[in-house]
């Protein structure tokens, strides 16, 4: 998602940062605000030779440690804040300068050992708070409403739930109705989705949820990532992993799987953005203890 020598802006906890990756895979991140006259560095450009970012306003240059670079020399002291990063497998993590309270999960490392990354889907900034977005991932009953269209899920049951600290695992049985030929034509992934799906979900609270699903010709590990951009906006994207003995699997279904993942995110976004402020529920549905577990972790972590 980063590309090479391209400034990439991210927002985290209400602050903007600029990230870039050099030719040889080094990754840098700085506060996005230029210390001269506050232009957004992410609108600037990267110099391949010096590995510096140039501000788009008056063209001052900074290295990855936030030091001013002029005429082939860097200053001793940084004048803009670098952001500390932890690169682990396919992901870049950061605590944004805060004290770490939750370890970086190894869920994605485990998946990338076994599965192949098909691509990224459903990248979106959702206009809703972090907790509301987290809870959707732990809510099994929303499939019946939110994902009724297209996936035609008519029932979704939690058959087992285990948790250990921030890690949780759920087995679910989802029953689907038949899709129309037109729907399958538009999205071939629907054609290989069985009617009774026994899915596994693994969670590394609060950032990652992996949805494991099996089809006769292969398996997918759909990894949902979430992080708070601001108090009222949450970032999400999906890392789609797959494995199959059939070499055509990837070729045939790559686009379809990424499309289907886009649809899932669209549907969740519409649902979560349309909610009124949270109140105490007057009715309860089965399987909601998984959601209470996540909410409790959130409250304690905060
Ligand atoms: S604002 Fe960045 S160089 Fe002036
Ligand atoms: Fe959903």
Image (cartoon, rainbow, N blue to C red):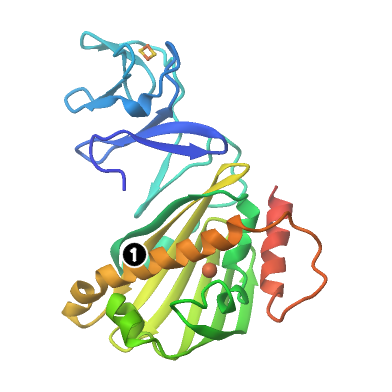
Q: Is residue 107 visible?
A: no
Q: Residue at x 37, y 24 (%)?
A: 41
* Category of crowding for the residue at label 1, using alpha-carbon neighbours closer than 10 angstroms: few (below 14), some (14–19), many (at least 20): some
Q: Residue at x 63, y 77 (%)?
A: 141
Give the x, y percent position of residue 38: 45, 16
For residue 103, side relative to residue 29 (left or right): right
For residue 245, side relative to residue 190 (left or right): left
Q: Which residue is mark 1?
A: 112
Q: Residue at x 28, y 86 (%)?
A: 217
Is residue 29 placed above or below 147 in the rendered structure? above
Q: Residue furthest front?
A: 182
Is 206 or 229 nearer to us in this picture? 229
Give the x, y percent position of residue 73: 25, 11
Give the x, y percent position of residue 125: 48, 48
Quadrant assignment, res 154: bottom right
Is residue 119 placed above or below 52 in the rendered structure? below
Is residue 45 placed above or below 198 in the rendered structure? above
For residue 196, side relative to residue 98 (left or right): left
Q: Is residue 297 visible?
A: yes
Quadrant assignment, res 161: bottom right
Ligand 2 lies under 8 Å from the Cβ of mark 1: no
Q: Residue furthest top?
A: 71
Is residue 74 placed above or below 267 in the rendered structure? above
Q: Residue at x 42, y 90 (%)?
A: 178
- SS type, badge 1: helix
Quadrant assignment, res 135: bottom right
Report how many numbered discs are placed on residues in the image.
Answer: 1
């Amino acid at each position: 998602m980063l590309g090479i020598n391209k400034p990439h802006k991210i927002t985290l906890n209400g602050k903007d940062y600029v990230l870039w990756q050099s030719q040889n895979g080094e990754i840098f991140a700085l506060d996005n605000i230029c210390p001269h006259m506050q232009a957004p560095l992410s609108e600037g450009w990267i110099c391949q030779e010096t590995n510096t970012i140039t501000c788009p306003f008056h063209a001052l240059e900074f290295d990855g440690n936030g030091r001013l670079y002029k005429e082939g020399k860097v200053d001793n002291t940084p004048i803009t804040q670098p952001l500390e990063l932890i690169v682990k497998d396919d992901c870049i993590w950061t605590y944004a300068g805060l004290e770490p309270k939750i370890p970086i999960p190894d869920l994605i490392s485990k998946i990338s050992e076994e599965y192949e990354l098909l691509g990224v889907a459903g990248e979106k900034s959702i206009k809703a708070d972090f907790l509301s977005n987290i809870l959707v991932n732990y809510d099994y009953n929303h499939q019946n409403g939110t994902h009724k269209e297209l996936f035609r899920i008519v029932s979704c049951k939690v058959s087992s739930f285990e948790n250990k600290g921030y890690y949780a695992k759920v087995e679910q049985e989802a029953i689907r109705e038949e899709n129309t030929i037109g729907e399958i034509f538009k999205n071939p992934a629907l054609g290989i989705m069985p009617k009774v799906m026994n899915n596994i979900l693994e969670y590394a609270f609060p950032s990652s949820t992996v949805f494991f699903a099996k089809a006769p010709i292969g398996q997918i590990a759909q990894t949902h990532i979430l992080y708070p951009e601001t108090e009222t906006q949450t970032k999400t994207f999906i890392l789609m992993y797959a494995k199959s003995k059939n070499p055509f699997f990837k070729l045939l279904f790559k686009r379809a799987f990424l499309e289907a993942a886009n649809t899932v995110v669209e549907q969740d976004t519409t649902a979560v953005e349309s909610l009124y402020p949270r109140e105490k529920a007057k009715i309860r549905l089965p399987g909601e203890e998984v959601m209470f577990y996540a909410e409790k972790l959130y409250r304690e972590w905060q």
